[in-house]
Image (cartoon, rainbow, N blue to C red):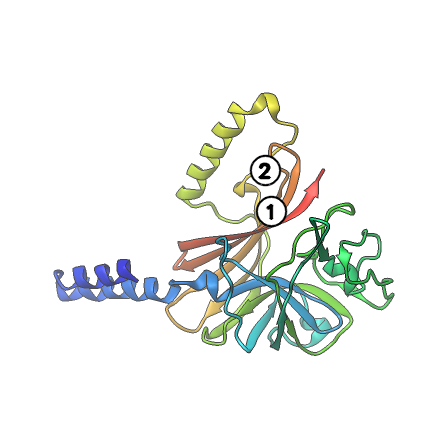
Amino acid sequence: MKRSLLVILLCFSYSSLLMENCLAQADSQLDIQGLDRRVFIGQAYPSGNVYLQSFYRKDGYQPRWPKELLILPLGDTKSALGKTQIKASFVKVMKDGLEDDVAKSIYIPGAEGMNDGHQSCGLGEIKKVAEQYQYISGDYFGALSDHCEPNEGVGIYHTASSKYSFLVLGIDPGIAVADLKLLSGKRPLAPADRQEIAKRKREDKKAADECTGNPTYIDSATQIAEIGLAEGDLRLRISTYEDPGCGGRLSSIYILDVVRRNMVLRKFEADRYQGAL
């Protein structure tokens, strides 16, 4: 907010034409302030339950879950569901357990009847897979069979039931969505991405003697979907890639780019650890 106010004040020192362009840029900055707290990523399941996490992951942060969210499927659900936008109502926030200093959680795909080949994580029931259930996309909450990831703070919403499970974005109702378009192919690289890749490669090279995995970088990310917003000439682009890192610890990385006229204004990331390879 302080940065945006400074931009607006600086605009008044320009000519009228430059001022108009400058204020437009300031507006776009105001539009994306805190966007990582208002856009959520996760998975919808046949039960109608939708599990979501915030893109903002600072330690101790507790998301403010709206009473309702607009759910955008990030897969080809139009033929299966007949729609590309779904409303969902807030249910509760997940809590993990602790027994004898051992953390216990729910393996979400197992509890939702989508994966009965995973061990129990201490809470909930691993249900037998229902034959009629189908995945339209991969599972955000999937993990290697011997790994249990904490789910403390995951928000649960509910919508109509179906036969399908799919990756989703949850959008705060204060953000007006104009359209959604599925994408494919590599995510375009910005100059900042190239700098990030070069830095990581230098770090990995220094640790080469201890490296047991083959790390991947943001240049391997593939596009999933693009959401047009009704205001500010802004688009949200979702991309993903998997990275085992140098130590063979597999994570799925999801990238939220805020784009205006093919320029990335902000980039947010959410990662979900899947376990050691």
* Residue at the disc numbered 2: 216
Contact, mark 2 vs mark 1 (Cβ under 8 Å): yes
Q: In the rendered structure, which disc, 2 or 1, sits on the residue that comes first in sequence?
A: 2
- Crowding around mark 1 (Cα neighbors within 10 Å: few <14, some 14 to 19, many 20+) is some
Checking the image for residue 260, the label placed there is none
**Horizontal relation, residue 209 to residue 81: left or right:** left
Q: Which residue does the image show at 14% across and 64% down from the upper left?
A: 12
For this rendering, which residue is in front, 52 or 242? 52
**Horizontal relation, residue 133 to residue 27: left or right:** right
In the rendered image, which quarter is residue 214 located in?
Answer: top right
Whole-number angstrom distance, CA of label 2 to CA of label 1? 8 Å
Compared to 213, does 129 lie above or below? below
Question: Where in the figure is residue 64, as x and y percent of width and height?
Answer: 50, 69
Q: Which residue does the image show at 74% across and 57% down from the upper left?
A: 107
Q: Which residue does the image show at 27% across and 60% down from the upper left?
A: 2
Amino acid residing under circle 1: Tyr
* Residue at the disc numbered 1: 241
- Crowding around mark 2 (Cα neighbors within 10 Å: few <14, some 14 to 19, many 20+) is some
- How many numbered marks appear? 2
Question: Where in the figure is residue 264, as x and y percent of width and height?
Answer: 41, 54
Q: Residue furthest top?
A: 209
Amino acid residing under circle 2: Thr
